[in-house]
Image (cartoon, rainbow, N blue to C red):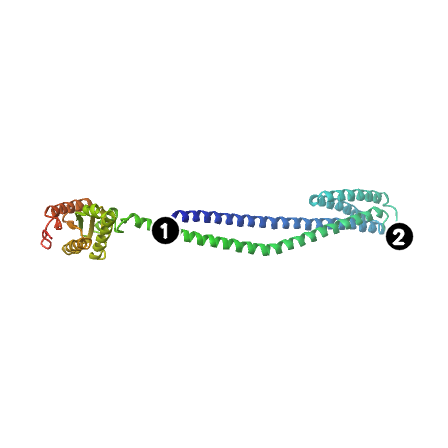
Amino acid sequence: MTSHGASRTMTVATAVVSLVLAVLTAFAVLTVSSIRASQHELERLTATVTVWRDLQLAVSEEAFAEAGYRRAPSEQSLARIEAAVAAVLDRVAAAREVGDARDSTTLSYVTVLNDRYVTELRRTLDTAPLPGDDDRVAGPALDSMSTVLAGAVQGHRDRAADKRAEQAAQTDLMLWVVPSGTLVGALALGGCWLTLVRAHRRLIVDAGDSARRAARDPLTGLANREALHEAFEDRRAAGAEMALMLVDLDHFKEVNDTLGHQAGDALLVAVGDQMSAIVRDGDLVARLGGDEFAVLLGADGGVRRVADAIIAAVADLAIAYDVGVGASVGTARRPVDGDTYEELVAAADTALYVAKRAGRGRAHHAVPTPDDERVLLG
């Protein structure tokens, strides 16, 4: 997977995660809204049943109040009739507040019947019931009301029962759908998360590969000029002493001219391999370009030993390739010959120039020291 492919995968996975989260959120909102709406409707129907039942009881109280007055007329029983009549009107008003259009029609009819009953009741207050008959005189309208109200109460009870059954079925469905939806969403999110993690790791690996490629010479695989500079600065920041060795192949152009660039490239790779085998772990071999190489050694890296070994290795390769190639080496130490990268490169380059002037195939150090005096090898 390339960096571009990993980035595209992360974009797609992110979009899928966002979509799954949006769907789960919408599903949760719809579920909650549906349950709340169903509960609200059930509460309304239950309240309606209660109100209509109260109205039914109030009408029954009118009948009881009339019968009581006719059996024993008194101010108290008359007041009971008036209270019962007022209660019916209150219950009708309460039923209108929670009812729908169908309830409004029924309540209007109940109101008409109740008005008839009250009118007839007040007209016949002084009339006693006949022996053996109902102890109500104004009862026919009341009976009609009772019949209407009984049907209305039962109808509301049936609707409430239907809503309860619907809510129960909805709840059963949610008990299956919610866990299933949650599981599917979790699996989708988990898959996307794994995809994102893998893509992220791929991007990190690709970034590391790109960084390593950017710091490497594409032909030999050695460090390039930028990597050499960076390594020097890291060691300088740590206060380390070090030596910089510049290596230039003598008469290398003749190899390209006589054997071709393919043979020249093979020789450069072989030189890089030999130099890498000579230095110790922690030392750095770099190709600066063309036939120029560099070695960054530690303070005790053995400049003389490394210079001898590189010149000898190039000589052996010249024999193997049957070419007249040699190696000239110029070295400089930090901080003796310079403190900065530029200063050390300039000092080593000057030493390299001196080595070439001395006859090539030699090594020269910028400033002789007791342990490493000016050396002309070859």
Which residue is outermost to the right? 131
Position of residue 364 in the picture relative to residue 65 (left or right)? left
Q: Is residue 162 visible?
A: yes
Which three-letter amino acid code belongs to the residue tagged 2?
A: Asp
Front residue of this view, candidates 9 and 57: 9
Name the residue at 85% across, 43% down.
123
266, 25: nearer the viewer: 266
What's the distance in space between the residues labelled 2 and 1, CA to CA?
101 Å
Image location of residue 103, percent across then percent down: 73, 44
Label 2: state its secondary structure: loop
Q: Which residue is mark 2?
A: 133
Q: Looking at the image, is mark 2 or mark 1 nearer the viewer?
A: 1
Q: Is residue 206 left or right of residue 287?
A: right
Q: What residue did someone put label 1 on?
A: 204
Compare marks 2 and 1 and give the one earlier in the sequence.
2
- Pick whichever, 45 or 25, lies toward us: 25
Res 159 label: none
Crowding around mark 1 (Cα neighbors within 10 Å: few <14, some 14 to 19, many 20+) is: few
The local secondary structure at tag 1 comes to helix
